[in-house]
Image (cartoon, rainbow, N blue to C red):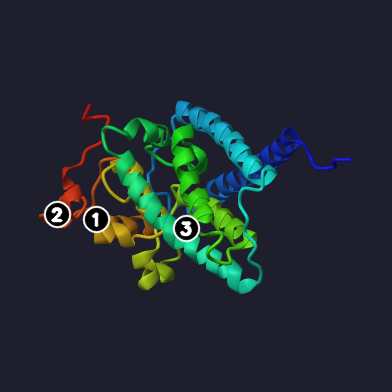
């Protein structure tokens, strides 16, 4: 007697689990940043959310939850991923490799998706000029497939070469989702003490990513600023914007810059030439 659950049963279980996770994390973060007075003072852009943005993002989130469940069902039901590593060393190795690789994959694909030819794939995500926790899952299905390819393809390529573990992969994907939601909160959550040292020069803060949504042509990194700094796509006034937000004086306009004399506020390298792909059409 075959007691293995059918494809449909596995899909429905995973879809329900992903939906519950999304509702809980998004709902808790949204409520927390709304009700906490101290965090309300650290709002990055002091602008309202258009109703049509939140409706469109909610609709996209439902589609992405179902898509993620479908991908996970295929991988699980047909046992495509054979991650047999165990123990803390395997878990940490898997997490670290995924973290480094996906930073590279995300930066490269993100910059490509901001070209005029490919921007239609990324356009759904940029419905949010001012980000909301829902923005973290607001993608087109094609863009989500590109992101999934970065993770699944990497694991498939290395699963027989290194002792990768399911727990390490799950831990990375969970952290990826949580920090993605926090990074789209339009609220600066990074403690001042942490951003003054090396951490603040490496880690992407919510302010860092909020400027990407408002200005388009820069700040392409996922969780680290390293590649933006190396390849000249970091905004020159980022630190000054962050100072203002921490002082409780967030930005009142999407186009607002916090400049030194002679500073344009555009990215520091060749990305100066990029514009919003929509305006270039």
Whether residue 37 is visible:
no
Looking at the picture, does residue 180 appear above or below residue 84?
Answer: above
Using the image as rendered, state which of residue 160 and residue 30 is in the foreground. Answer: 160
Lower sequence index among marks 2 and 1: 1
Tell me residue 232's x, y (percent).
22, 56
Quadrant into which the C terminus falls = top left
Using the image as rendered, state which of residue 230 and residue 199 is in the foreground. Answer: 230
Location of mark 2 (residue): 263
Please tell me whether mark 1 sits on a helix, a strand or a loop. Answer: loop
Quadrant into which the N terminus falls = top right
Q: Where residue 189 is drawn, which disc sits there?
A: 3
The residue located at (54%, 68%) in the rendering is 93
10 Å neighbourhood of mark 2: few (<14), some, or many (≥20)? few
Tell me residue 144's x, y (percent).
48, 39
Disc 2 from disc 1: Cα separation: 8 Å
Using the image as rendered, state which of residue 180 and residue 129 is in the foreground. Answer: 180
The residue located at (66%, 68%) in the rendering is 86
| Most distant residue in the left direction | 262
Please tell me whether mark 3 sits on a helix, a strand or a loop. Answer: loop
Lower sequence index among marks 3 and 1: 3
The residue located at (43%, 42%) in the rendering is 131
Whether residue 159 is visible:
yes
Looking at the picture, does residue 128 appear above or below residue 268?
Answer: above
Tell me residue 59's x, y (percent).
54, 29
* Res. 280 image quadrant: top left
Disc 3 from disc 1: Cα separation: 19 Å
Looking at the picture, does residue 95 appear above or below residue 266?
Answer: below
Using the image as rendered, state which of residue 236 and residue 177 is in the foreground. Answer: 177
Contact between labelled residues 1 and 2, with CB atoms less than 8 Å apart:
yes
Tell me residue 150's x, y (percent).
46, 49
Q: Where residue 237 is drawn, which disc sits there?
A: 1
Lower sequence index among marks 3 and 2: 3
């Amino acid at each position: 007697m075959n007691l293995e659950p059918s494809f449909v049963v596995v899909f429905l279980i995973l879809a329900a689990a992903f939906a519950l996770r999304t509702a809980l994390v998004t709902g808790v973060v949204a409520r927390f940043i709304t009700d906490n007075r101290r965090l309300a003072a650290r709002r990055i852009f002091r602008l309202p959310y258009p109703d049509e943005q939140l409706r469109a993002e909610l609709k996209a989130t439902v589609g992405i939850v179902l898509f993620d469940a479908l991908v996970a069902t295929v991988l699980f039901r047909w046992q495509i991923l054979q991650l047999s590593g165990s123990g803390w060393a395997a878990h940490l190795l898997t997490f670290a490799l995924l973290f480094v690789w996906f930073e590279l994959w995300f930066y490269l694909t993100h910059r490509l998706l901001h070209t005029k030819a490919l921007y239609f794939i990324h356009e759904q995500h940029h419905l949010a000029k001012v980000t909301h926790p829902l923005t973290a899952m607001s993608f087109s299905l094609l863009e989500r497939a590109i992101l999934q390819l970065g993770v699944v393809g990497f694991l498939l390529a290395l699963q027989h070469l290194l002792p990768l573990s399911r727990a390490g992969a799950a831990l990375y994907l969970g952290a990826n989702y949580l920090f993605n939601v926090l990074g789209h909160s339009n609220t600066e959550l990074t403690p001042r003490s942490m951003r003054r040292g090396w951490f603040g020069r490496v880690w992407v803060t919510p302010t860092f990513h909020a400027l990407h949504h408002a200005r388009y042509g820069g700040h392409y990194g996922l969780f680290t600023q390293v590649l933006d700094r190396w390849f000249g796509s970091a905004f020159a006034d980022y630190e000054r914007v962050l100072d203002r937000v921490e002082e409780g004086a967030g930005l009142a306009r999407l186009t607002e810059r916090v400049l030194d004399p002679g500073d344009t506020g555009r990215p520091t390298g060749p990305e100066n030439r990029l514009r919003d792909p929509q305006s270039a059409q």
